[in-house]
Image: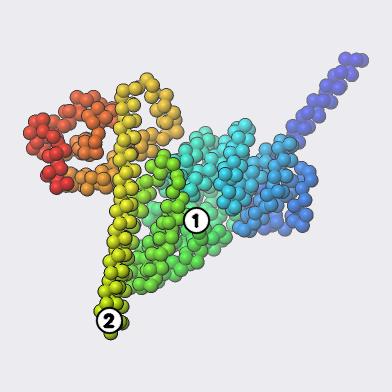
Amino acid sequence: MKLNHYMGVIACISLLLLGSCNSEYSESRNFDDIIFQIENDPQSYLLRLDTINMNCVKNKRDAVHFILAAITLSYTDNNYYPPKSVLERCIQIFKKEKMIQPYLETLYLLAETYKKENDITKEVHTIETAINIARQEYDQEWLFYLYSYLGEMYIRQFNTLNFIKYQTLANQCIKDVNFQNMSISTQIQVAKSFLYLDRYKVSYEKLNEIEKHLGKKNIFLSEIKRLQGIALYKMQHWDACIEKLKEAVVEETSIEHKFTCFAILTYCYYRKKDLLNAEKYKFLAIENSINGGNAFAEIEFYTLCAEFARLNHDAGEQIKCLNKLKEKYEMAFDCLNGESLDKAIQAYTNICEKQSIYRQIAIYKYILIGLLLVLCVSLVIYIQLRRKQVYRILALQQQINSLDNLRNVKNEVKEFILRDFEIAKKIAILRSTQQVQSARFLKDLEKYHIIDENYLLGTQWEQFYNHIDLSFDGFYSKLIQKYPMLNDKEVQLCCMLVSGFKTEEIAAIWMNSVFSVHKYKTNIRKKIGIPEGGDIILFLVEKLDL
């Protein structure tokens, strides 16, 4: 009898434990199913919600109700952000009840709220908390989504190094997950990551595959069409891009995304020589431009607007666009100021591009100043000669200041490049002379594909040649034009020699012997007519008029 009694008690306890597990599993499944319903038709779900007392959260049921309502409202109202105090209360409840999916959704909403307030420290802390939870649960989809969020957050801060780091981590999380088994939001993020990797065709195909399974009321439909339009724009399919972006912008509620659509439509019509529509979408883009958006996208857009104004001989509009360009550059430079040297080195490639644009802006300024001077002379011809001279002196002073600014920017970029070369030399010597000590360090770098993607650790010759031209008065361009018979290795050797690399450092970078480098030097002397043992660089400097 006692044995039967004990067996009965054990059976009851087992049933209770099994029921508890099934209840937790059922709750998780039910929550995910409701999220799926909200994504496919948020408006119909919103009609069933009681939003009057939803901020009063006392228990688990209230917390779930609040989070589902907050998610629905965030989908239907772009300006809605749930109260932080209520979100923090929900986080406490979900943590205590070990409700993982609602817990992660709440942390994500809290991070979005901090993003709105521009509180980067708390935003990062919240996302990293979510990452730790997802890692404990081994939820690869959430990890991918959260790492992608961090990557996009850092690219907003012009921090390319951290963007690459977190994008790499995100892709590693998702590599073993079947694309068909992912949630819709994760599939879209995967397609977006292909855009970051310049794999535009693959991204477009993935987006088409996702679109086939979406209803007409799905909240992700406009985002998919916008991303399709961006992929087509990158592939230079102007007509198809225009069609997709026009469909996307009808449903788009985000001002930043509207600006992106209108700016790309402006560019597409410009490329199609349809200046009337280009002008139309230019004004729509300006109406939707906001401070704190994608500064580089706005720089590209206002550069195009300045070109429109120049073609239409509209000096006033051109001045406005140039002033906008100046504001965007100042904002970008403010973000870069105060960064550490390592971060500045990562961003200096952007400075190189901006330098070229600054030269164009300077040219526009000179043209505008000339036009203004001619106009002033024609209008104030009766004014005294001394006043005319004052105007000319002011104009010359402006030109001098502009030239000084350009010279300072160029010197600054040269310093970054020379530091880059020194770092490359040190890494090369480390590889060749301290192989045992550096093996673990290089292995860690390769683990995250940093050596392949980072110009400091990988040998990206086209970028290197651009730096050589900038720092040594067009040495590379003059070299290949003057001596086309030199092969790739010989051109590389000449460029490294002119930038101060020693024979041992060049051998380390090529992963060859010093003897091989001397052999290439001998071949160069024969091809360009240098006596045996002659200094290659002294000869080239003289021949290339450097």
User: Is 135 positioned to the left or the right of 195 in the image?
Assistant: right
Q: Nearer the viewer, residue 387 or 297?
A: 387
User: Is 483 positioned to the left or the right of 8 in the image?
Assistant: left
Q: Nearer the viewer, residue 456 or 18?
A: 456
Residue type, mark 2 in image: Gln
In this view, the residue farthest toward the bottom is 382
- Tell me whether circle 2 and circle 1 mark residues in contact (CB < 8 Å): no
Give the percent coordinates (x, y) of residue 458: 34, 35
Colour pattern of the rendering: rainbow
- Which element is circle 1 on? loop
Would you say residue 460 is visible in this rendering? no
User: How would you rate the neighbour count of disc 1 (Cα within 10 Å): few for under 14, some for 14-19, many for 20 or more?
Assistant: some
Determine which residue is flagged by label 2. Answer: 384
User: Is 29 positioned to the left or the right of 542 in the image?
Assistant: right
Q: CA distance from mark 2 to mark 1?
A: 49 Å
Give the percent coordinates (x, y) of residue 363: 29, 63
User: Is 227 positioned to the left or the right of 141 in the image?
Assistant: left
User: How would you rate the neighbour count of disc 2 (Cα within 10 Å): few for under 14, some for 14-19, many for 20 or more?
Assistant: few
Give the percent coordinates (x, y) of residue 257: 51, 57
Q: Compared to 204, does 395 lie above or below?
A: below
Residue 293 tag number: 1
Residue 24 tag number: none
Q: Compared to 403, does 482 lie above or below?
A: above
- Which element is circle 2 on? loop
Q: Compared to 312, does 285 lie above or below?
A: above
- Ranked by sequence position, the earlier of labels 2 and 1 is 1
Residue type, mark 1 in image: Gly
Name the residue located 13 percent from the left edge and 32 percent from the top edge.
Answer: 523
